[in-house]
């Protein structure tokens, strides 16, 4: 596990739990509006694994869970071993993923290593453009959704409402594909820090609050939907 960063305490990232958030280094997608570009690139870790587990041991009784985010955690070859070590310390584990590796997700779920999952849906799950993700990886997202809908682990969907990837039609496509009881959280992005500056020159405006409200109303015909971070 290459650890790119650590948020020591969060009350927002793991529903109902006080948690630490670990950011795995490296990502197999290339979302141009990515809020943390350094995490997208593989490189030297910023926190040693031993130091991380030493931190967790000291915070037992204060923290309830660990969120493993990124980057994209499922590209880490030792993810299952790492999560098992976190669970052995008595922590609940939430995984944030882009859905590109249903096999990894299913393996973790069958081993009962996950307590919550957040799946980022960037656009229509059946129509990711190459500017967001390699087609072979994007093709795995429907399978990831099917695994989550099995009901073994509580989960949520998240969508960053960034043009041109999200509009009225894509929100409807996302909501129809995700339809069920799991919630969808809509959020904006941070225009000051993005992976691709050219993206901001072409799409300089974040969605307005009324746009998010409109998207929320559309999605609520199919699943619970909320606006986050506004």
Image: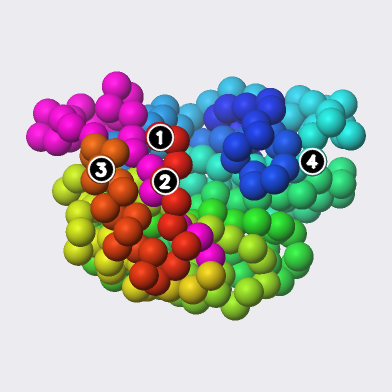
SS type, badge 1: loop
Nearer to the camera, 105 or 157: 157
Disc number placed over residue 210 in the picture, else none: 3
Disc number placed over residue 227 in the picture, else none: 2
Q: Are marks 1 and 4 in contact (CB under 8 Å)?
A: no
Q: CA distance from mark 2 to mark 4?
A: 25 Å
Is residue 135 visible in the rendered structure shown here? no
Q: Tell me if 163 is positioned left or right of 60 in this view.
A: left
Q: Tell me if 125 is positioned left or right of 96 in this view.
A: left
Can you give x and y, in whole percent of width and height, for residue 93 in the image?
71, 50
Q: Residues within 10 Å of mark 3 (few under 14, many from 20)?
A: few
Q: Tell me if 25 is positioned left or right of 35 in this view.
A: right
The quadrant the C terminus occupies is: top left
Magenta-highlighted stretch: main secondary structure? Answer: loop
Mark sitting earlier along the chain (1/4): 4
Q: Are marks 1 and 2 in contact (CB under 8 Å)?
A: yes
Mark sitting earlier along the chain (3/2): 3
Residue shown at 31% from the left, 48% from the top: 213
The quarter of the picture where residue 7 lies is top right
Q: Which residue is mark 4?
A: 64
Q: Are marks 3 and 4 in contact (CB under 8 Å)?
A: no
Depth check, mark 3 against mark 2: the one in front is: 3
Residue shown at 60% from the left, 40% from the top: 13
Can you give x and y, in whole percent of width and height, for residue 192 in the image?
29, 22
Q: Which residue is mark 1?
A: 230
SS type, badge 4: loop
């Amino acid at each position: 596990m290459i650890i790119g960063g650590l948020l020591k305490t969060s009350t927002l990232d793991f529903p109902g739990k006080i948690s630490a958030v670990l950011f795995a280094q490296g990502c197999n997608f290339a979302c141009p509006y990515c809020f943390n570009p350094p995490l997208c690139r593989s490189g030297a870790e910023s926190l040693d694994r031993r130091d991380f587990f030493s931190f967790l041991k000291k915070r037992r009784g204060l923290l309830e869970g660990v969120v493993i985010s990124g980057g994209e955690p499922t590209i880490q070859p030792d993810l299952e071993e790492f999560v098992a070590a976190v669970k052995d310390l008595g922590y609940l584990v939430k995984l944030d993923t882009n859905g590109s590796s249903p096999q990894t997700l299913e393996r973790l779920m069958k081993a009962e290593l996950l307590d919550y999952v957040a799946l980022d849906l960037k656009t229509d799950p059946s129509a990711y453009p190459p500017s967001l993700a390699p087609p072979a990886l994007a093709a795995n997202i429907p399978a990831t959704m099917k695994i989550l809908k099995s009901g073994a682990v509580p989960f949520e969907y998240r969508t960053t409402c960034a043009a041109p990837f999200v509009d009225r039609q894509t929100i409807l496509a996302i909501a129809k594909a995700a339809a069920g009881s799991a919630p969808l959280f809509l959020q904006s992005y941070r225009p000051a820090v993005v992976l691709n500056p050219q993206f901001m020159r072409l799409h300089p405006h974040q969605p307005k609050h009324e746009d998010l409200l409109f998207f929320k109303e559309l999605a609520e015909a199919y699943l619970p939907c909320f606006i986050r971070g506004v």
